[in-house]
Amino acid sequence: MGHARGEVELEGKVLVVKRIKVTYTGLSIAAEDAEKVQRVLAFHADGCPVARSLRGAIDITTQLG
């Protein structure tokens, strides 16, 4: 399961989403596969339509929880 948390900043009088941190939890990953999964998380946003639409405007990071 993934959990996303957005971080906002005030620009003038408007709150703007600046960062989104996605944490994947509840996954059963063998210790020997953890490094592979981290590598996939590092580039999977390139194939995500939402992440690509937001690229440049909002910093999106992913990690295992």
Image (tube, rainbow, N blue to C red):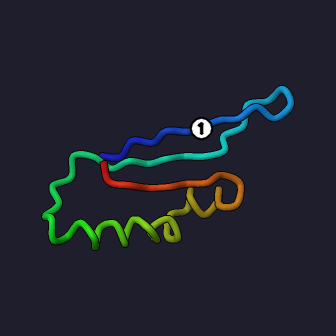
Q: Element type at marker 1?
A: strand
Q: Residue at x 28, y 73 (%)?
A: 36
Residue occupying the far top of the picture = 13
The one nearer the camera, 45 or 32, is 32
| Near-viewer residue (53 or 56) | 56
Q: Is residue 59 left or right of residue 3?
A: right
Q: Residue furthest right?
A: 12
Residue 23 picture location, percent across and down: 38, 47
Residue that numbered label 1 is attached to: 7
**In the rendered image of this protein, does residue 4 appear above or below residue 33?**
above
Q: Amino acid at mark 1?
A: Glu
Where is residue 27 shown, x and y percent of the image? 21, 52
49 or 36: nearer the viewer: 36
Percent across and percent down for residue 9 are 71, 35
Q: Is residue 27 left or right of residue 59?
A: left
**Among the 4 quarters of the image, the one containing residue 50:** bottom right
Taking the image as shown, residue 37 lies to the left or right of residue 15, namely left
The residue under the point 37% across, 71% down is 40
Residue at 17% in and 60% down: 29
Local packing at callout 1 (Cα closer than 10 Å; few below 14, some 14-19, many 20+) is few
- Image location of residue 3, percent across then percent down: 39, 41
Q: Give the residue at x 13% y 64%.
A: 30
